[in-house]
Amino acid sequence: MSECTHDCSSCSSNCSQRSRESFLAALNPQSSVKKVYAVMSGKGGVGKSLVTSILAVLAQRSGKHAAILDADITGPSIPKAFNIHERAVSTDEGLIPATSKSGIDVMSLNLLLENETDPVIWRGPVIAGAVKQFWTDVIWKDVDYMFVDMPPGTGDVPLTVFQSLPVDGIIIVTSPQELVSMIVEKAVHMADMMNIPVVGIVENMSYFECPDCGKKHSIFGESHIDELAAKFKIPSVSKIPIDSSLAQKVDAGQIELFDGGWLDSLSSTL
Ligand code: ADP
């Protein structure tokens, strides 16, 4: 078999690339999205939305146009971090995403709810359908980098995202308290099955840096993330400390003002 050129139209081979392409959902005709990265975690509360937000802010700061597709339907925290409270506008052409202060486009189910505190009591396939519609029905204008904030775990919605969206890479977020090795292994296997590379792993709440002496304390024990990354050949490892100012910025809807270079190296590889 000749080497893959990633152009299925001129090749008859039935490889995994082709089977993935046959599931891909079409974008709205007015949309253009150059790169798509999915941000995953094993469970909720580890900082997946924070990492998604920081990566979008870094891309936007570098002069690119960033967007966030909030696929964490039942726990959407992206609009709050960017202080977005208005409802999305629907037109004949499609749904218009909300735009953050610095120009990041955001679509989240919270922007479609009558009341943003309403709970979403939907079954998996309905949620997966809504996420797919965020890709097909929203007008994503001239987006260079889209970051998808995935729901925790490896269930229905991640599967739909990986099948329907042309995801270029996966970023795994963990925290030191978790059964990290099992979570990473599951995510890596899912990525392998979908033929999508894991481009980075982020250990959030990795350590606490003493504001007086600068010493780093591993509050939750020593990190094993570097060994895991080496084992699974994940090219980029990042660590974010426990930082109360980060939590305050998220709470105040000011994540665009965050200060810290923890994800600079990962961001520069995307
Ligand atoms: P997930 O998306 O994984 O559910 P979030 O990103 O919403 O998690 O983070 C959960 C909570 O923890 C949020 O209130 C967030 O502000 C806080 N948080 C996340 N990472 C940090 C950190 N490194 N330092 C301090 N607070 C953090």
Image (cartoon, rainbow, N blue to C red):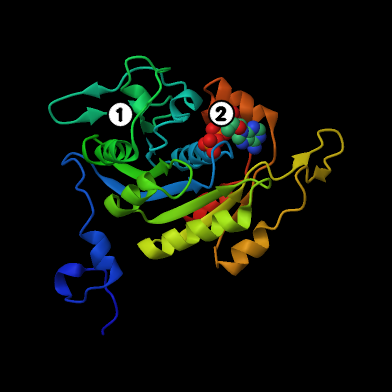
Is 29 in front, or is 242?
242
Q: Tell me if mark 1 has few (under 14), some (14-19) or many (20+) residues whose alpha carbon lies within 10 angstroms of its own.
A: many
The disc at residue 198 is none
Residue 50 seen from this side: no
Disc 1, disc 2: CB below 8 Å? no
Residue 257 is labelled as 2
Question: Which is more toward the observer, 94 or 48?
Answer: 48
In what element is the residue under mark 2?
helix
| Residue 102 higher or lower than 170, as above or below | above
> What is the secondary structure assignment of the residue under circle 1?
loop
Labels 1 and 2: the sequence-earlier one: 1
Q: Nearer the viewer, mark 1 or mark 2?
A: 1
Query: Does 6 sit above or below residue 81?
Result: below
Which residue carries the number 1 mark? 97
Residue type beneath disc 2: Leu
Instruction: Name the residue: 44% across, 50% down.
Output: 154
Q: Is residue 156 visible?
A: yes
Residue at 59 percent of width and 50 percent of height: 202
Q: Find the residue positioned furthest to the bottom.
A: 1
Residue 259 location, x and y as percent?
62, 34
Q: Amino acid at mark 1?
A: Pro
| Residue ranking furthest to the right | 213
Q: Residues within 10 Å of mark 2 (few under 14, many from 20)?
A: some
